[in-house]
Amino acid sequence: MKVVEIETPRGPARAHLHPAERPRAALVLGHGAGGGVAATDLVAASEAALDERVSVALVEQPYRVAGRRSPPAAAQLDEAWTAVVDVLCAGELSALPLIVGGRSLGGRVACRTAEITRAVAVLCLAFPLEPPRRGSKPPESRLPELEAVTVPVLVVQGERDPFGMPPAGPSRKLVTVPGDHGLKADPPAVAAAVRTWLAEVIPERRST
């Protein structure tokens, strides 16, 4: 594993690189709002990807590198994320089909920027479909962020996730696993879902 610091318009980010042997694709994953890249589901997904010969980069947003727990506005998160992905795709992960994703907040960022980053697929771990209710205000669904993605999407969701259960769609696969939003109850189930899906979405690389 190699850790690199990457400058972004929002301050330095950090990428934890796990190169696969003879990689077929690259998977770049972001963390949840208050967590880090060592989250159980991110580790499980990373191990599954490496099993499929997919190089992995786990990205720490600048606010986390700076020691803050509360994320900034969505536009700032997206700006930092796309800057990191651009640098990785120009260097460590160059010439590889790109799959983006993340845990909770990280998955939302990946969905919003999937077109800009030219991703071939998106992986969402514990997608937070509905935020907690505030007073009498009705819940706001984040389903439009998923619906806007035009490439294949996998959502791995805990069957007891209090943030709700996103629906499957024409190009969106939903896999439910034991547990809640933390996805800590059954890491092998998370890994199995990711491994199966990666085998389906990685483009064939034909030699010319």
Image (tube, rainbow, N blue to C red):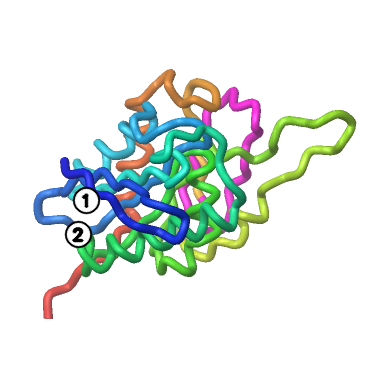
68 vs 119, left or right, is: right
3 vs 139, left or right, is: left
Q: Amino acid at mark 1?
A: Ser
Q: Predominant secondary structure in magenta?
A: loop
Q: Is residue 11 visible?
A: yes
* Residue found at x 60% / y 52%: 74
**Pointer 1 with pointer 2, Cβ within 8 A:** yes
- Mark 1 or mark 2: name the one nearer the start of the chain: 1
28 vs 205, left or right, is: right
Q: Quadrant of the C terminus?
A: bottom left
Tell me the SS state at disc 1: strand
Residue hosting label 2: 92
* Residue found at x 46% / y 26%: 183
* Percent position of residue 205, x then y: 20, 68
In front: 145, or 175? 145
Q: Is residue 197 visible?
A: no
Q: Does the magenta run of residues contain 159? A: yes
Q: Does the magenta run of residues contain 47? A: no
In front: 202, or 93? 93
In space, the residues marked 1 and 2 are separated at their CA atoms by 9 Å
Say which of marks 1 and 2 sits in front: 2
Q: Which mark is residue 55?
A: 1
Q: Which residues are magenta?
A: 153-172
* Percent position of residue 3, x then y: 22, 44
Image position of 191 with respect to 195: above or below: above
* Residue found at x 47% / y 55%: 10
